[in-house]
Amino acid sequence: MSEEQIKNLEEQFEARIARDEKIEPKDWMPEKYRKTHIRQMSQHAHSEIVGMLPEGNWITRAPSLRRKVALLAKVQDEAGHGLYLYSACETLGVSRDELYEQLHSGKAKYSSIFNYPTITWADMGAVGWLVDGAAIINQVPLCNTSYGPYARAMVRVCKEESFHQRQGFEIMMKLANGAPEQKELAQDALNRWWWPSLMMLGPTDAESIHTEQSMKWKLKRKSNDDLRQQFIDQTVPQAELIGLTIPDPDLKWNEERQSYDFGEINWDEFWQVVKGHGPCNKERMKARVGAWEEGEWVRDAAMAYAEKKQARKQKQAI
Amino acid sequence: MSKNWPLWEIFVRSKNGLEHRHFGSLHAADAEMALENARDVYTRRNEGVSIWVVESVNITASNPEHNGEMFEPAQDKVYRHPTFYDLPDEVKHM
Ligand SMILES: [Fe+2]
Ligand SMILES: [Fe+2]
């Protein structure tokens, strides 16, 4: 194809998206669109999968059967989210194996929030309430993104997320209304998860690359700072409702903006964690790679069994 | 050894009276496992009463680059639609 033809196709392509048309897997697309989508969708899938680890940590120690079935169901949903997203990503011509390889080798990123430890039961509350809460804010606009398989996967994901957040908030509420020691546990969890949850919505707009292109392709509908403000504005009253204090001395209602002003985010910490120096980066990768490697004989055995069954069927047919 | 599990397309009938609809895809060693995995991945909340699995390599898809030859011929065949036919207003129930 000549350069002119490509330019022409690109213009038509952008116009289709501007008209709110969806792009489907076999449609022509600019190479950059394909690559950007593989990157964002796989990062998203990796986050769902690695995201199971901090919560999986508490399944066996949940304080009641009710909490245990809920947490188990939530973690199972996250596995499902990872699978929807991996298969949506595969429609762009990348294999599952390549995607895993990128995660395991450290080439691909996942959400930095999952590199923080879950040290008390209250962390299950804080994660559901804040981390899933921030994830929902990120994900809802993606239900209208331009790439069909991604948009469809996100519709399913978003439908399932709201129970995650509610079960988390319920845990926090119970603890906050409990004995002083329980309330302390809840407050401590909020103190540790608040700032990482704000960071989860991404670097400030001034430092965020890709934003303009991503807006055009509807991979992003609002800027990181807008999403963060939305998260803060909706979460502060929830904390107040259960008598917990947001760990930010600069947090203040701004009558004029009809929004909360908030303190400085420690971006050094964010970049440290992104670069692999968070409290649990190594542990997470070790668990993930270990599960993959130790599961190899199971995958091989299943394949061998399937082939044997197939051969037997063919023999019977003769 | 490491031979990858093939990819399967999953179709789910959400309730009797409706058609099976494409829900997504997943990897499984064989059809039976694809069915079991599809149950866990796509119907955790009663989304279905019946599942079809088809190995993805068995699907032949039309090429959107040929959409012109493929679908445009239907565009000028307005006589296939009821509105093409002029009838007096007095004709009822038609
Ligand atoms: Fe999720
Ligand atoms: Fe979730």
Image (cartoon, rainbow, N blue to C red):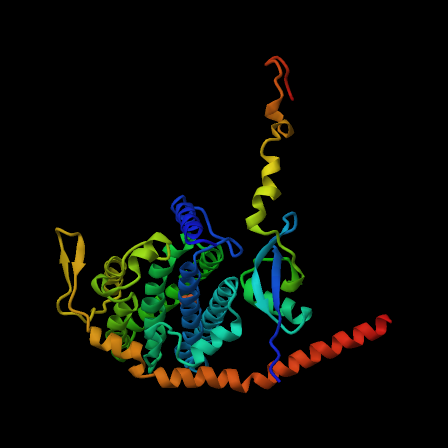
Residue A293: image x %, image y %?
A: 52, 85
Q: Residue at x 40, y 82 (%)?
A: A284
Q: Out of B61 and A307, give the one closest to the viewer.
A: B61
Residue depicted at x 12% and y 51%? A256
Q: In which quarter of the image is ligand 2?
A: bottom left
Tell me where residue A114 appears, x and y as whole percent.
Answer: 35, 76
In the image, A2 versus B70, the foreground residue is A2
Residue A289, above or below A97: below
Of A119 and A135, the residue lying toward us: A135
Across the whole image, how many numbered discs are drawn on residues? 0
Q: From where the camera sits, is residue A42 visible?
A: yes
Q: Is residue A182 left or right of residue A266?
A: right
Residue at image point 40% right, 51% down: A7
Q: Is residue A152 above or below residue A268?
A: above
- Quadrant containing the C terminus of chain A is bottom right
Taking the image as shown, residue A13 lies to the left or right of residue A241, namely right
Q: Is residue A39 or residue B22 the one in the foreground? A: A39
Q: Is residue A232 left or right of residue A14?
A: left
Q: Is residue A64 visible?
A: no
Residue farthest toward the right in the current orientation of the protein: A318
Query: How far across and down, in percent of the image, does residue A140 sit?
Result: 38, 56
Q: Residue A67, how many percent across, how many down?
A: 43, 73
Which image quarter: residue B26?
bottom right
